[in-house]
Image (cartoon, coloured by chain):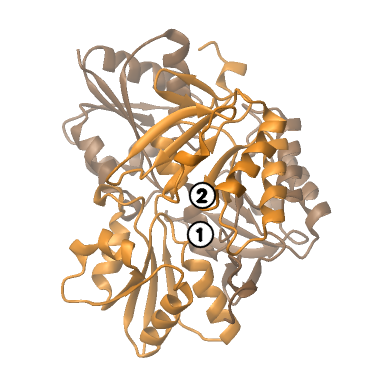
Chain colours: A orange, B brown
């Protein structure tokens, strides 16, 4: 009785980017469940715990196990990288609980999501209103993704692109945005932010090389005011409309 | 010589929501600069440091002081709540450095931004593509805000609304979204997430009470699939299109 599931965001990967609450939730848990890559990222915290490490695309299984263990009365940490809401395990877990009518105590522990991590490495591209858009076509139909890319471009939002696993789709999304915003728009390309093999590059919509992008890459497309200064990509908040900077 | 500015995100407010990197950056700094409310949130970390605590709307001054101290060779922590890019101090600092052609070593330390904090308290409303939209009309013209609200609604994005300081504008933004998405769309209203006086409420676009909202409130408007289950607001990621949950 009295089981509980912490859905824990461990941040971009490096231990320094974890919150104290994330560490604490894992410390309190008897069982830790996660994708094998994320389990490795918290290896230092697993001493004496039951660990359920699962392959990619076994998200339903990971949620299943977490629910089953919690129903046995155990405290479970279900870990996601970044933030667990943002294309992580939290929405799936809640959806399964709701569909099945299972009542379990759940606490979501937020984390630094990949857009914030990539943005910090680029300088400050997320300085104005922005969109977070998932490019994985596994769960969202491609026409929805392209429609959202268009609306994001029309709204002059900065656009953070997650999970560019399909290079054809990424190319089409970038074309949609380029048609609205023009080829000189800055694009930040960040691979493995705060992890081994980190690589940061600033390019433009006209010159971005889709073949350099892999699934561990976040792209941030600037809005109409975003500019590059030295090695920094910067989106103004609007102070220059009001103050002499 | 060799000054440095850390632009530090301290997260939503409670010490447990800070990252280790944020603590470390403040520990390494000789000077800590910030809005007086944020300075209070890190009071436990200030021992022996020079502290520059500034009033609201003195953002240019805060950046000025940070730059001046760094040019004296000091290490400075310029603190923002949440993440420093997201309507925090990072974009202004970079813009001032760029405009003035001043070269200083700057490191952005990301943090848990308010949308993630509010979302965690609501369950998982940010489970699909979302927009982060600042409702303060101080730096962005109102027509731009309303245009972005419309595009966000048309793109069926979840919408996180920051800084609802102008209740008339908030009302107009919610009307724009409601006209596209309908009055039964769930809305999460979170005041003081992870701070004293935290209050969480789930309502709808048809019933949201704008007079209950203050500047310390984040609103999250669901997309067309967002639903409420018990005390949770949930936006599916799309697994039910592929799996039997």
Residue A58: which quarter of the image? bottom left
Q: How many marks?
A: 2
- The residue wearing badge 1 is A87
Does A146 appear above or below B96?
Answer: below
Residue A159: x and y, percent? 58, 40
Q: Identify the mark at residue B245; answer none if there is no mark.
A: none
Q: Is residue B214 visible?
A: no
Q: Nearer the viewer, residue B173 or B215?
A: B173
Do the numbered discs 1 and 2 sit on residues whose CB atoms are within 8 Å?
yes
Q: Nearer the viewer, mark 1 or mark 2?
A: 2
Q: Secondary structure at mark 2?
A: strand
Q: Is residue A223 left or right of residue A66?
A: right
Does B13 appear above or below A178?
Answer: below
- Residue occupying the point 32% across, 79% down: A75
Chain bearing mark 2 = A
Find the distance from the CA under tag 1 to the CA under tag 2: 9 Å
Q: Identify the mark at residue A162; answer none if there is no mark.
A: 2
Does A82 appear above or below B89?
Answer: below
Q: Nearer the viewer, residue B54 or B205?
A: B205
Chain bearing mark 1 = A
Q: Nearer the viewer, residue B239 or A69?
A: B239
Residue A179: x and y, percent? 71, 32
- Residue occupying the point 45% across, 51% down: A215
């Amino acid at each position: 009785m009295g089981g509980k599931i912490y859905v824990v965001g461990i941040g971009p990967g490096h231990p320094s980017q974890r919150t104290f609450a994330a560490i604490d939730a894992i410390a309190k848990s008897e069982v830790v469940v996660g994708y094998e890559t994320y389990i490795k990222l918290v290896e230092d915290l697993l001493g004496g715990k039951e660990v359920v490490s699962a392959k990619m695309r076994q998200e339903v299984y990971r949620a299943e196990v977490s629910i089953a263990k919690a129903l046995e009365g155990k405290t479970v940490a279900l870990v996601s990288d970044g933030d667990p809401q943002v294309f992580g395990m939290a929405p799936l877990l809640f959806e399964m609980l709701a569909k099945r009518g299972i009542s379990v105590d759940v606490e979501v522990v937020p984390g630094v999501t990949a857009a914030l991590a990539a943005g910090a490495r680029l300088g400050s591209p997320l300085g104005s209103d922005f969109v977070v858009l998932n490019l994985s076509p596994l769960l969202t139909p491609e026409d929805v993704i392209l429609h959202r890319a268009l609306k994001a471009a029309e709204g002059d939002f900065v656009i953070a692109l997650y999970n560019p696993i399909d290079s054809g789709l990424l190319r089409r999304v970038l074309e949609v945005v380029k048609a609205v915003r023009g080829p000189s728009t800055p694009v930040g390309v960040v691979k493995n932010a705060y992890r081994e093999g980190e690589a940061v590059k600033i390019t433009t919509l006209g010159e971005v090389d889709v073949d350099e992008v892999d699934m561990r890459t976040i792209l941030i497309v600037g809005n109409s005011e975003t500019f590059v200064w030295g090695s920094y990509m910067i989106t103004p908040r609007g102070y220059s409309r009001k103050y002499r900077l």
